[in-house]
Amino acid sequence: MLFAPALVLLVVTTSAPLVYLLWTSLMRIDLTMPFLSGFAGAANYVKMGSDPRFWNSLLLTLIYTTTTVVLQVVLGLSLALLVMQIPRGQTVLRVAAILPIVLAPVVVGLFWRTLLLSPDFGLVDLVSHALGFGSHAWLGDPQLALVSVIAIHTWQWTPFAFLVLLASLASLPPDVFEAARIDRANAWQRFRRITLPLLRPAIVIVVIMRTMIALSAFAAIFAATGGGPGTATEILNLYAYRTSFTEFNLGYGAALAVVLLAITLVISFLMFRMRRGR
Amino acid sequence: MSRGGSVSLRNIVKRHGSLTVLKGVDLDIRPGEFFALLGPSGSGKTTTLRILAGLESHDAGSVVLDGRDVTGSEPGERDVAMVFQSYALYPHMSVYENIAFPLRMVKTPNAEIDRAVRESASRVKIAHLLERRPGQLSGGQQQRCALARAIVRKPRLFLLDEPLSNLDAKLRLETRVELRKLQRALDVTAVYVTHDQEEAMTIADRLAVFMDGNIVQVGTPEEVFRRPVSIEVATFLGSPPMNLIPARLAGREAAIEGHRLQLESDYGAEREVLLGVQPSRIDIGAEGIPAQVDLVEHLGDSVIVDLALGATRVRAKLPERTRLAEGANVHLRFDASDVHLFDPQTRQRITA
């Protein structure tokens, strides 16, 4: 009975909203046409099948998640391997790496939009101009906008992968690498045959955690592009938000959110299964 | 199988910051020899082995293997194999893959790898464990796996860094003998680092004694044991180590606590010395140098007796049947031929 308060708190804060979300997703609630409200059954879900904006947002979500996760792991691992070669000053780099992580994603989004990507004034634009690539509407062009939001997320979260992989690298037994050197393995063979397999558990954990976070990314994109231009950066999460709170179609928005939740759960479940499988 | 290679170290100097770890090490190891680097921890023996392997750089001097200067070349280019103190097995690979690794790295055909792996594994009696992971092996089996990985490529030089120190006492004695047989059968040169003087004495053809970054003596175990060049070497060898008794030396005579001892040669003018004698060379009888029994330790097959000889503590190793009461007054005897004389100032051996 002593855990009753905790249980109540959990039900009120987590389970109840979730159940309410599921319930809402089965309703027709369109605040622009309140007279049509009522129980709709699976109609919201059926509607998604023929909704090109939904399929577009789903595709964007997959592109966004895959590229950011792959980039984070590849860049994070490369940085960790580089930093391991530095005899001194690793601590400074570790502290520096934490900085982007502790920033709120909204702040990161705004900061990139105003200071780095804004035409003529932003640092990225200035560098691009100086290198002769010219000035671009980094967040205004549909293709560049997607690249930009991927870059923003990668910039903020690569340090996480870097720190985890650096810690894992530092804990690998040095004598195993010495044995490999004596056994005539060159640098690439040592990386491929020793480092990567020994880092595998850490890499898998990073991929799982980052995938779950990337699937539910929202604030940085919302602050940088708001999902635009048009629907160029409108990942599923943003589509659900826009449907609910700018188009006031709460029922359909809830159904979109439920689909995102289901996708996240299924992917996480599969990844954990893969991890245990080995 | 080709005979093992020769090793020459020329004036190897190694510094860690302001600390000089190796102060000019010279060493020649003959082909097919089982050579031990013996010394207390921090004396530079492991550093020497790692420089030989190419795992560590050095500040001056050269490493010559089979007449070829390999100073500065990668470990993999030196054709040496090494057994690490920790074994350093690849934890994510099976025993089979661990042993196959040195061959895979040079793109050996699979059929040849398979044959070589199975041959090496059966040589060290782990042929039935090939599918296991290192984590599923006992310490002794891991050690054998590391040995198999080292011998599979038939290197010209075999480096062993305290390979037995993580085994229990019984297994250590067995493995010591097997290691020796294996080296003989493969006819490979082996360099063996150990801090255990008994291990070095029993296993090595010749050994080098390291003290404080220098090699202080090189020779067969018997030579080193019979004629230690300094007090440091004398007290490092033997268990228990050599006794050192203050004495006055004059001509052919040494005086200990008023007792006169005839020596084999004439040492000239009178002076203070330290007289060394191995515990096993001391006998207790009715006549000789008077001493008092402090403590008696029974070792099963022998007895170690702690004696007070004036202000000096002397230990004697006696047959197990010796019955001595603690506190008893006894007399010590030893042969003049078992006496070693050292200069207390230079700490070097005195020769006539």
Image: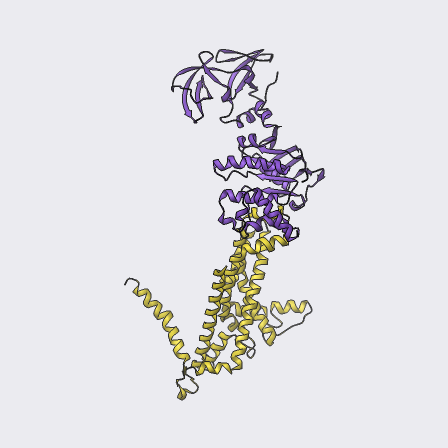
Chain colours: A yellow, B purple
Front residue of this view, candidates B350 and B104: B104
Q: Quadrant of the N terminus of chain A?
A: bottom left
Name the residue located 49 percent from the left edge and 18 percent from the top edge. Answer: B282
Q: Residue furthest bottom?
A: A35
Front residue of this view, candidates B129 and B219: B129
B234 in relation to B109, above or below: above
Percent across and percent down for residue B281 are: 51, 19
Name the residue located 54 percent from the left edge and 35 percent from the top edge. Answer: B176
Percent across and percent down for residue B287 are: 46, 11
Residue B64: image quadrant is top right
Q: For this view, does B334 lie left or right of residue B78?
A: left
Q: Is residue A185 visible?
A: no
Q: How many marks?
A: 0
Percent across and percent down for residue B115 are: 62, 48
Residue B311: image quadrant is top left
A278 in relation to A254, above or below: above
A258 in relation to B73, above or below: below
Name the residue located 60 percent from the left edge and 56 percent from the top edge. Answer: A192
A143 in relation to B246, above or below: below
Residue B307: image quadrant is top left
Q: Is residue B40 visible?
A: yes
